[in-house]
Amino acid sequence: MKVKDWIEPSFGKFPAAVDVVLTGIPLSRSSISASAASEYPDFFRKAWHLFTTYSIDENVDFRDMKVVDVGDVKMHGTNILQCHANIEEAMKNVLSECPNSFYVQIGGDHSITAPIVRAFQEHTNKRIGILQFDTHLDLRATDSDGPTNGTPIRQLLDAGVVRGEDVYNIGLHGFYNAPSLIRAADHYGVNRITLKDFRRKGASVLIAEVMAELATKVDIVYVTVDMDVLDITYAPGVPASTPGGMRTDELFDLLFEVGKYEHVGGMDFVCLDPHRDSREQQTVKSGVYAFLQVMLSRFMHVKK
């Protein structure tokens, strides 16, 4: 595994002070679609050497931002609930040991978001909002679908960890959400922003509006990026890839806007299967680029 010279490996221990903590969460047994998203944390790390910390677009180098990789959460071989318990416990440890950091989790499938957000809420005892970039609502019923990548938002809503009015899903499009899921979204009051809605407003206007609304309701915003929000042309390495989705430049612009806001406390990138990717690893590279956009924006607008 290659570790980028500006990212400090800290496997098995926690640094005293750090701007950003990276945690790998290699779980994909809980995916509805056959998936090797558990392999993405390692592919993410291996792809670092293809990028620098300097953005020619902004003429900014964020090399001075201290980013630490604490390694992967240990997964149980077969027990998904045990895996989720391990994730929740590991995140509580990270939050305790690095209380003033920004937290980035590299999945893994989308089921990992539920235990991560539970850890945030239990550790902080604050009201959590969710900004979700996704093709799907992820509101399947847990009694029939279990703790899968199709139910993380439903799990959090049913448990009262988050409120429906504090969930904003951006990027919905096409023919990929059944009417039952729309009814569930209406029942819980989940905010739905379609890809068409986003394109009419643009990244800066839309994110400013969403963040302004969230700022009046929640203490912390958690961002979850399901890479299936991207069109299949741009992201072949996604198990539930679809036509008609977002372009990579649109996702990058949205995440740059998200990075400007101090009350965004953490985020994850999920549902990227490197073994489905093109030979050029275009989806893996897009995932790393998306991460870098957030780091750059936070360096410019939050870290002073």
Image (cartoon, helix red, strand yellow):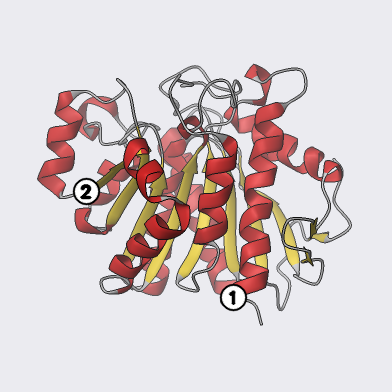
Residue corresponding to mark 2: 190
Q: Look at the image and tell me in which quarter the N terminus lies.
A: top right
Residue 21 in view: no
- Residue 152: image quadrant is top left
What residue occupies the far bottom of the structure in this picture?
304
Label 1: how many Cα within 10 Å (few below 14, some 14–19, many 20+): some
Residue 78 in view: yes
Question: Residue drawn at (33%, 63%), measured in percent from left and top?
Answer: 209
Mark closest to the chain's N terminus, 1 or 2: 2
Q: Look at the image and tell me in which quarter the C terminus lies.
A: bottom right
Say which element carries label 1.
loop
**Is 244 rendered above or below residue 114?**
above
Where does the image place residue 83, in percent across and percent down from the top left? Answer: 49, 40
Q: Amino acid type of disc 2?
A: Val
Question: Residue drawn at (37%, 37%), measured in percent from left and top?
Answer: 195
Give left or right: position of 197 versus 51: left
Residue corresponding to mark 1: 302
Label 2: how many Cα within 10 Å (few below 14, some 14–19, many 20+): many
Give left or right: position of 172 versus 95: left
Tag 1 near tag 2, CB within 8 Å? no
Where does the image place residue 114, in percent across and percent down from the top left? Answer: 38, 47
Give left or right: position of 265 versus 304: left
**Is 30 rendered above or below residue 110?**
above
- Residue 15: image quadrant is bottom right
